[in-house]
Image: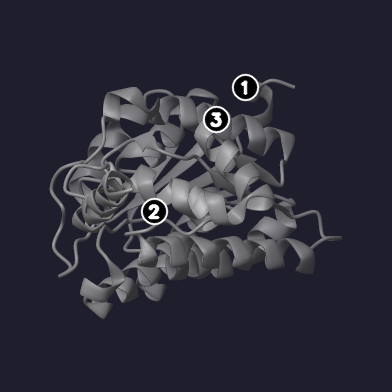
């Protein structure tokens, strides 16, 4: 069965639909004939996207701050009011961060958990009766950071681990109810998530420390996600780097810690770059002394 046959007339909610993976996923769903519900905080962006996609499919937009429980409840209510059912919920809305924990204002972790974890919980809670009725799909977009903690990303990793555990448990609870639960880990994807990442004091980073043009495009990520929804996959981990990381965590966990540290330390203005440079100098001095 191809995507056109599978997604035709299915009702799909996409959170974080105003940019990045969420926007690309909404576009792909509309292209395949799904009835799409766009959820994000910016009404202006949502209206522009709704206008664009309405030319190819039935689309509504609902302004939603997923960290607010009543917003998530309203999102589900407006979806059912418009379309009468829910077949797919894609919990994509999320924010990132970049700072050492020792320097971090704890409000940043609260914000990460509110958006990434609680946003997934709220939307899933209110959509669940309709998803069970339709034997539909609930998707959580995590990251390899939801399998292996990334240095400088404590709040981000914690929130993604939490989503992983929540959805894994939800799958077990409804093992015999026909509910499809998928945990989707795209790896580094070209999007604005690094530009909007929070720093130690909670302000936005404003620019990306990575070469976005070398990453997988959000459009490609969206197409892969929909393929796995159609196949009703349990999990999907993208990119060679992501798959290699998960393999190394299982077989060489200590070595992986070191490799990950130095890989992340290469980022421009890394929050632990100075520390890594000091360690390099010490090793060089030690070798010269010998």
| Front one among 117 and 246 | 246
Residue under circle 3? 240
For disc 1, the neighbor class at 10 Å (few under 14, some 14 to 19, many from 20) is some
Give the image location of residue 52, x and y in percent. Answer: 30, 28
Q: Whole-Å distance between the Cαs marked 1 and 3?
A: 28 Å
- Out of 12 and 102, give the one closest to the viewer: 102
In the image, taking residue 269 as reference, residue 265 lies left or right, namely right
Q: Residues within 10 Å of mark 3 (few under 14, many from 20)?
A: few
Circle 3 sits in a helix, a strand or a loop, which is it?
helix
Mark 2 to mark 3 CA distance (whole Å): 24 Å
Nearer-N-terminus badge (2/3)? 2
Where residue 97 appears, x then y in whole percent?
A: 28, 59
**Image location (x, y in percent) of residue 21:** 40, 38
The answer to whether residue 42 shows anywhere in this view is no
Q: Reading the chain from its start, which is encountered first: label 1 or label 3?
A: 1
The residue at the far front in this view is: 290
Residue extending farthest right: 176
Count of number-bearing discs: 3
Q: Which residue is mark 1?
A: 4
Q: Is residue 180 above or below residue 200?
A: above
Asked which quadrant contains residue 179, the reply is: bottom right
Residue drawn at the location 53% of the way across and 39% of the way down: 242
Depth check, mark 1 against mark 2: the one in front is 2
* Mark 2 element type: loop
Q: x, y percentage for residue 68?
A: 35, 72
Find disc 2 in the rendering and name its residue. Answer: 93
Instruction: Compare marks 1 and 2 and give the one earlier in the sequence.
Output: 1
Q: Could you tell me which secondary element the residue under label 1 belongs to?
A: helix
Left or right for 261, reference 102: right
């Amino acid at each position: 069965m191809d995507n056109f046959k599978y997604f035709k007339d299915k009702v799909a909610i996409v959170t974080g639909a105003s940019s990045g993976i969420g926007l690309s996923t909404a576009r792909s769903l509309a292209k395949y004939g799904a009835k799409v519900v766009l959820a994000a905080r910016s009404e202006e962006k949502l209206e522009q996207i709704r206008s664009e996609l309405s030319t190819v499919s039935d689309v509504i937009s609902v302004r939603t701050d997923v960290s607010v429980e009543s917003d998530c409840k309203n999102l589900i209510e407006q979806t059912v009011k418009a379309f009468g059912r829910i077949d797919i919920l894609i919990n994509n809305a999320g924010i990132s961060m970049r700072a050492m924990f020792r320097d971090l204002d704890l409000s940043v972790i609260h914000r990460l958990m509110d958006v990434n974890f609680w946003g997934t919980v709220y939307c899933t809670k209110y959509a669940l009766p309709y998803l069970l009725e339709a034997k539909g799909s609930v998707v959580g977009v995590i990251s390899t950071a939801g399998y292996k903690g990334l240095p400088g990303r404590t709040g981000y990793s914690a929130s993604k681990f939490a989503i992983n555990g929540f959805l894994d448990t939800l799958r077990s609870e409804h093992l015999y109810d026909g509910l499809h639960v998928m945990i989707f880990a795209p790896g580094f994807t070209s999007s604005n998530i690094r530009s909007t990442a929070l720093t130690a004091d909670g302000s936005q980073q404003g620019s990306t420390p990575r070469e976005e043009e070398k990453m997988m495009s959000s459009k490609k990520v969206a197409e892969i996600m929909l393929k796995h929804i159609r196949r009703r996959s349990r999990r999907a981990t993208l990119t060679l780097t992501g798959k290699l990381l998960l393999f190394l965590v299982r077989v060489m966990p200590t070595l992986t810690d070191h490799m990950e540290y130095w890989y992340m330390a290469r980022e421009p203005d890394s929050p632990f770059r100075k520390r890594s440079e000091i360690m390099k100098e010490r090793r060089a001095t030690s070798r010269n002394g010998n």
